[in-house]
Image (cartoon, rainbow, N blue to C red):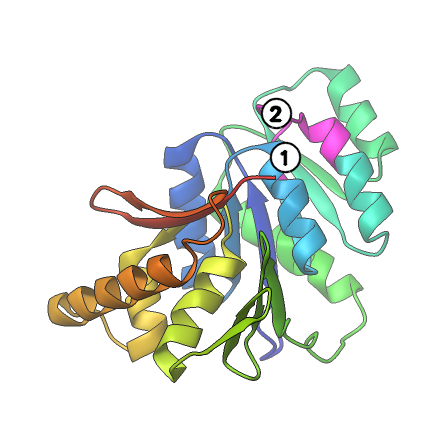
Amino acid sequence: MSNILHKILLIEDDLSMGFLLTEFLEDQGFEVKLCRDGESGYNALKRQPYDVCLLDVMMPKMDGFTLATHCKELNPAMPFLFITARSLKEDKLKGFELGAEDYITKPFDEDELLCRIKVLLRRQPQQLPAPQVQKFTIGTYVFDYSRQELCYQDETWRLTETESEVLKLLCQNQNQILKREDAVEKIYGKKDYFLGRSFDVFISKLRKMLQNDPRISIDNVFKVGFILNVQS
């Protein structure tokens, strides 16, 4: 593999399998975004491009076949493969008809999955990494990461560098769990209890800044992290 950090979108409603696959793929040098249902996976695809999409068939809110159709509409060049317990010939044929590059049935060997992903990546022309999103819409707020500004109507807050980094991570994981340990490591470069407490302080500050819009909340997930929830 090249030294480009490839991004994988994993959509798996089985939380245990999702975490195991995420950990395995991250250990192999990939950046992995885990979504637990088809709808959140679709929203993730709309926010940024991915190099490969791994999706289950049986998922809440939007099944894998429907999501695959949307995948092709959003990014026809992005390869995707199904990882599913459904092994019927009809399901496999439907998956391939929708444009899937592969169809892997559970249980499967992780190393085999890794090989198939590498094959897909080798088929893709090497490109420069996509530019990072600099502006985020959060309900009625606009967060300009490049300027470290959070705007609401005619009010503008100038954020500190750390506040900007925390809010950026929350925005990139909007309506998804942002694990405290992962966020602390990305921001401070290491995992540490006291740095985690400092991170919580920044969360409290951001809550106050975002309180003007009742559709927005930063919710605690006990012993795991936080979710930036934005109701449509």
The chief SS type of the magenta part is loop
The single residue placed furthest to the left in the displayed view is: 194
Q: Quadrant of the N terminus?
A: bottom right
Q: Is residue 16 visible?
A: yes
- Residue contact between numbered discs 2 and 1, judged by CB atoms under 8 Å: yes
Q: Nearer the viewer, residue 37 or 156?
A: 156
| 57 magenta-colored | yes
Q: Which label is found at residue 39?
A: 1
- Tell whether 130 sits left or right of 176: right
Residue 187 percent coordinates (x, y): 34, 75
Q: Which residues are magenta?
A: 55-67
Q: Which label is found at residue 144?
A: none
Who comes first in sequence, dot 2 or dot 1? Answer: 1
Q: Which residue is mark 2?
A: 61
Q: Nearer the viewer, residue 16 or 191?
A: 191
| Residue at figure coordinates x 22%, y 69% from the top left | 191
Q: At label 1, which amino acid type do we have?
A: Glu
| Residue at figure coordinates x 35%, y 78% from the top left | 162
Residue 143 percent coordinates (x, y): 56, 69
| Residue at figure coordinates x 60%, y 22% from the top left | 58
Q: Quadrant of the C terminus?
A: top right
